[in-house]
Amino acid sequence: MNILNKVNSSKDVKLLSPKELKLLCDELREEIITTVSQTGGHLASNLGSVELTVALHRVYNTSTDRIVFDVGHQSYAHKIITGRREAFSTLRKHGGISGFPKPYEAEDDAFIAGHASNSVAVALGMARARTLTGGKYNVAAVIGDGALTGGLAYEGLTNVGGSGEPMVIILNDNGMSINGNVGGIAKLLSRERINPRYFNFKRWYRSVVGKMTSVYEVNHKIKEAVKTRLLKPNIFDAMGIYYLGPVDGHDVEQLENVIRWAKEMEMPVLVHVITRKGKGCKYAEEHPELYHGVGKFDPETGELPAEKRCFSSEFGRVLCDIAEKNYRVAAITAAMSGGTGLSDFSEKYPKRFFDVGIAEQSAAAMAAGMAKQGMVPVFAVYSSFLQRAYDMLIHDVSLQRLHVVFGVDRAGLVGNDGETHHGVFDIAYLSSVPQMQVFAPSSYAELELMLNRAVNEEEGPVAIRYPRGGEGRYTSCSSSDSEILRSGSDITVVAYGIMINSALELADRLFRQGIETEVVKLNRITPLDTGLVLSSLSKTGRLFIAEDVCEAGCIGNRILSDAEKKGVFLKNSCVCNLGEGIVAHGTVDELLCDCGLDIESQYKKALGLVRGEK
């Protein structure tokens, strides 16, 4: 029996029998495993939230009610249920559906999601808008225990408790974010998981006397006394949010009953749901950290492709070598030790390794404190996640010129995770931080040299930005802040980071047309010394630069500004970038082509520049 063929909306899920609901969950898991094995994506988190998603669709109508997913990497079942089953095979592919909730895909996606810990605050905003406008919709937030390691979650919870707004918060508790959870909240939730007695009592109490109003009111104090006896003080109750749970997150009927009950209470309620990451898939259950975000894999055995050497792994290797010689070096991650290459460091130097959870602001502030007291903290973080710590970069680090090193991973276009994950704004925001130095290695050898320089030679804040994936054609190493890789008199091509690879290919193509190209490679991009570039421009009179970053604060515009200030005459110029920086998902090559940054597009633009074409 194929139940999925019957389901295209929340309304269809509500029509299913209990037996059909069980079959639906099985079919959703099969669909997710089959598709993700071909497209890559987030596997374990989606398998763990299938029953929860089905229960939510039994209680809510997602075309009008607002369900806000935190991060959104557990929304695959939701997408399939809400009319996107036929498109699900295009998951994360160029032109296909996104791996995260996107309102432009369907009205059932209440809010864009890609980063953690904001769902409660967003949902509260929607609830308050409902009250102010007289709306009739319901509001729920789905947040994982991993996201509760982020301070923004508590800001939202505090305001929800004080608001009195009717809304439901679903705490999807599987004991993990990407790696195992850390900190006090993990210990608190662990205590709640092992004491379900009060919830069982409360269910019995409501079923027996809940409809007998007079008895219910008389015995309310008795119930509260039982609660006090069975449970220790609860952080959510203390905030003014009524706590229900823990609930078996893989029992659809129980979940539906509790969530419906929570909705009908017409007050802030938190439902604590216990799930198992990777549920229903043996290899994902046993190793959820390996199957959090995956590429293609064998759906039968779970066999993953062999890990390749990349900038992240090289960063971790070099940092281990540096830490062996310099005892003041410490490494910090925000729940991304594996993704940022710090797994080996955490094993070799556990006392100097700190995982703060999904709390980039806290990581940056803690790093500042460590630096103030003589340590050399190295915070490895994805470019798009470091955005959240911008205030700390200025207020806590740069104002005191503290020596904190930032390993800015996933700089540039990252591919299939799309606009919430592309690292295309870091040059703009890092360059605005006083005292900040920003280096852009083009090869593994340069990454090693720059990381050693950043830790052992420089002062103040230093960032090293490097891409997802590995090096390309350029594998050499330069110790200067800029250099000329190829001399020419017709056009100056400027590049940094891995974009140097296309610059060298461009120079080859132009040479075959008889055009002499001077290729200038920038290694330190903030503060930017344009001396070498302007000297080249004085000779060629033509500037071409391609950058996989947003236009605001891009290097090309800074070069043009300096050229004008210093009276360097340009015949013409072409500054290519990502415009406002909002780029969809797809492979990096596909996205470069979309944005006119592929080698063929660069060649046509540069050729036209030399020939004086518009």
Image (cartoon, rainbow, N blue to C red):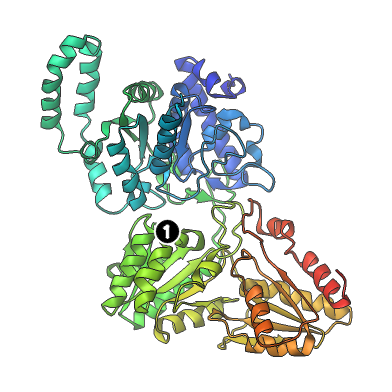
594 sits left or right of 28 in the view:
right
Image height check: is 395 above or below 106?
below
Image quadrant for the C terminus? Answer: bottom right
Residue 179: x, y in percent?
A: 39, 53
> From where the camera sits, is residue 488 visible?
no
How many residues crowd mark 1 within 10 Å: few (<14), some (14–19), many (20+)?
many
Q: How many marks?
A: 1
Amino acid type at image mark 1: Met
Residue 359 lies in what quarter of the image?
bottom left
**Viewer-proximal residue among 308 and 341:** 341
Residue 505: x, y in percent?
A: 76, 74
**Viewer-proximal residue among 215 and 96:** 215
Residue 434: x, y in percent?
A: 45, 76
347 sits left or right of 503 in the view:
left
Tell me what residue is drawn at x 52 percent, y 27 percent: 64
Residue 510: x, y in percent?
A: 83, 77
Q: Give the labeled residue for mark 1.
A: 336
> From where the camera sits, is residue 83 visible?
yes
Image quadrant for the N terminus? Answer: top right
**Mark 1 secondary-structure assignment:** loop
Residue 309 lies in what quarter of the image?
bottom right
Tell me what residue is drawn at x 32 percent, y 38 percent: 160
Image height check: is 432 above or below 45?
below
**Viewer-proximal residue among 515 and 305:** 515
Tell me what residue is drawn at x 20 percent, y 34 percent: 195
297 sits left or right of 188 in the view:
right
